[in-house]
Amino acid sequence: MVDVPNVRLNNGVEIPQFGFGVFQIPPERTAEIVRTAFEAGYRHIDTAQGYRNEEGVGQAVRESGLSRDEVFITTKLDNSRHGDPVPALEESLKRLGTDHVDLFLIHWPRPRHDQYVQAWKGLEQLLADGRARAIGVSNFQVPHLQRLAEETGTVPAVNQIELHPRLRQAELRAYHRENAIATEAWSPLFQGGDLLDEPVLADMAARHGKTPAQVVLRWHVQLGNIVFPKSATPARIAENIDVFDFELSAQDVAAIDALDTGTRRGPDPDTFG
Ligand code: NAD
């Protein structure tokens, strides 16, 4: 069984650094695929209200034979629910079949709607009453994080952002480091695509006896990012988590860093939603 290290969040809660993302996993296949991930050693699942597959995640936990406290579950507040995050999480808990989540995130800041500070105050309430063991944000830019710092009393435990070798997010990562916010990397593999065809990754993969996907995931782990690649294919699910038996050199890391072109795969957080 793979030995995944934990990252200690700013409120002391421990999160497995490596997890499984279920964006675009069809609801009717989620339970089966998440069970496959548990069998491969994953213990951290990243879902969202908007993915419409929380029921399948809950079903997989119940069918896995694992106890609730062996599994770390993250869900995210839907963009339409910034005004009522408390009932929104209560609905998630019913779908997941649990009385708490391990991490609850504001999915997108939607700055034009200007409700994320109000939403954050709801998450603070959920943290205080134990229905979320930790709270954080996703897709927040530095000014959004600064605004939470000025107007509320809780520093987000994490900021989950698009991050991969084509978009290293140096500025946000520096802000996170200075403010004790853990960095979670979404689309860590650039959603597959042509990143994995880069010759530099193929060379490195051959040298380490690994695949280009494993090299990219190992780069994330060595940067300290929390990652949860998605796959619906059992062989890839097992391949992706098998990154704890080799080490990239400082030169390898620098060569992957050099692939940064500032390219987003997903929407711009300043305008999305
Ligand atoms: P990802 O970078 O994990 O890429 C997944 C895709 O990469 C797969 O569909 C497959 O095509 C390919 N792939 C996976 N393993 C591979 C392998 N071993 N070899 C070759 N190709 C492989 O992209 P993602 O699903 O967008 O991101 C991961 C998770 O991040 C999501 O499931 C979700 O939990 C989270 N996420 C969050 C946000 C957000 O706004 N907070 C947005 C997108 C994703």
Image: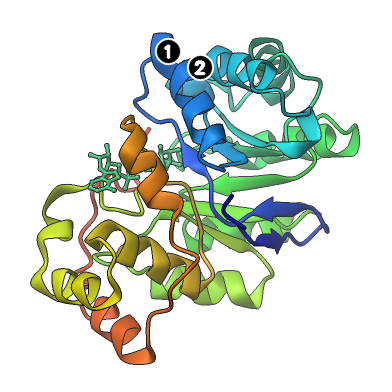
Label 2 Cα neighbours within 10 Å, binned few <14 / some 14-19 / many ≥20: many
Instruction: Say if disc 1 is inside 8 Å of ligand 1.
Output: no
Q: Nearer the viewer, mark 2 or mark 1?
A: 2
Residue designated by label 2: 31
Q: Callout 1: 10 Å neighbours few (<14), some, many (20+)?
A: some
Could you tell me which secondary element the residue under label 1 belongs to? helix
Vertical arrangement, residue 163 with respect to residue 248, above or below: above
Residue in the picture at 36% in, 33% down: 234
Of 25 and 123, the residue lying toward us: 25
Number of callouts in the render? Answer: 2
**Residue farthest toward the right in the current orientation of the protein:** 129
Residue that label 1 marks: 27
Q: Secondary structure at mark 2?
A: helix
User: Looking at the picture, how far across and down is residue 136, in whole percent?
Assistant: 65, 47
The Cα atoms of the two marked residues, 2 and 1, are separated by: 8 Å
Task: Choose top left, top right, bottom left or bottom right for residue 115.
Answer: top right
Please say if 145 is above or below 230.
below
Residue positioned 59% across, 57% down in the render: 17
Q: Give the residue at x 68% y 36%.
A: 118
2 and 1 marks in contact (CB < 8 Å): no
Amino acid bearing label 1: Pro
Q: Residue at x 60, y 75 (%)?
A: 177
149 relative to 58, above or below: below
Counting from the top left corner in percent of width and height, residue 53 is at 48, 17
Location of residue 261 in the rendering, given as x and y in whole percent from the top left corner = 18, 70
Q: Which quarter of the figure has residue 133? A: top right
Query: Residue placed farthest to the bottom in the image?
Result: 251
Give the percent coordinates (x, y) of residue 242: 44, 56
